[in-house]
Amino acid sequence: MIPKVTYGTRVRGLLEYLWGPGKAEEHINPHLVAGYDDASLLTPGRHDRDGERWSLDELAARLDAPQIAAGERGVKQYVWQCSLSLPAQEGQLDDATWGRIAGRFVAEMGFTGSPDRAGCRWIAVRHGLSARGNDHVHLVVTLATEDGAPVWLRQDKRRSQQVAD
């Protein structure tokens, strides 16, 4: 498994990319395979007026809520994104398997919380093979816990590689 971590400041922008066409028109079937809540409850629908576009407002608001609660205490680049991909020669996994991998990964990264700390909101998006034919999933995590406490990361890129191995 190959992890690639990036950071951002806009959940909505990342969601638009993940549910959009992609850089090489590779985003053919965007859908959630896991999340901090039941994926069927988090899944965005199609826009009412334009059945081609996705209605991402509610999902973005749900993911942003803990960061809004954190306010000035929050992390500036609070959107943590990690793509987990398989080498093309390893083939494809089904949604259920990717969902289990995503859940295990965010738990081992410490994003799901513990008895002493609330967890972060997160989703796992799958949308088709990459332009190079790699099966993959995108994890989107907001770096504020359910109670609005900021999450400060240390060596998360190194840790993501350890967790992915």
Image: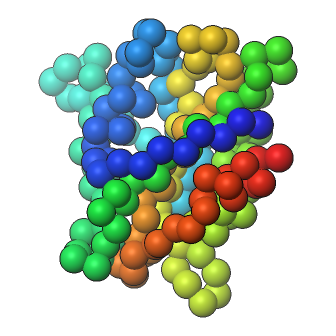
Looking at the picture, does residue 131 appear above or below residue 19? above
Residue 53 placement: quadrant = top left
Looking at the picture, does residue 105 appear above or below residue 116? above
Residue at the image point whose x is 47% and y is 44% from the top: 6
Q: Residue 105's x, y, as percent?
A: 70, 54
Residue at the image point whose x is 52% and y is 67% from the top: 153
Q: Return the residue nearer the eye: 52 or 111.
A: 111
Looking at the picture, does residue 53 appear above or below residue 162? above
Q: Is residue 54 left or right of residue 160?
A: left
Q: Residue 61's x, y, as percent?
A: 27, 55
Residue 129 placement: quadrant = top right
Q: Return the residue nearer the eye: 44 or 14.
A: 14
Residue at the image point whose x is 31% and y is 32% from the top: 16
Q: Is residue 164 left or right of residue 117?
A: right
Residue at the image point whose x is 28% and y is 38% from the top: 13
Q: Return the residue nearer the eye: 163 or 68.
A: 163
Q: How is the image coloured?
A: rainbow
The outermost residue toward the bottom is 116
Residue 12 placement: quadrant = top left
Looking at the picture, does residue 117 appear above or below residue 122? below
Q: Tell me, yes or no, if residue 120 can be seen here.
A: yes
Q: Tell me, yes or no, if residue 40 can be seen here.
A: no
What count of labels does the image hold?
A: 0
Q: Quadrant of the N terminus?
A: top right
Q: Residue 138's x, y, as percent?
A: 55, 38
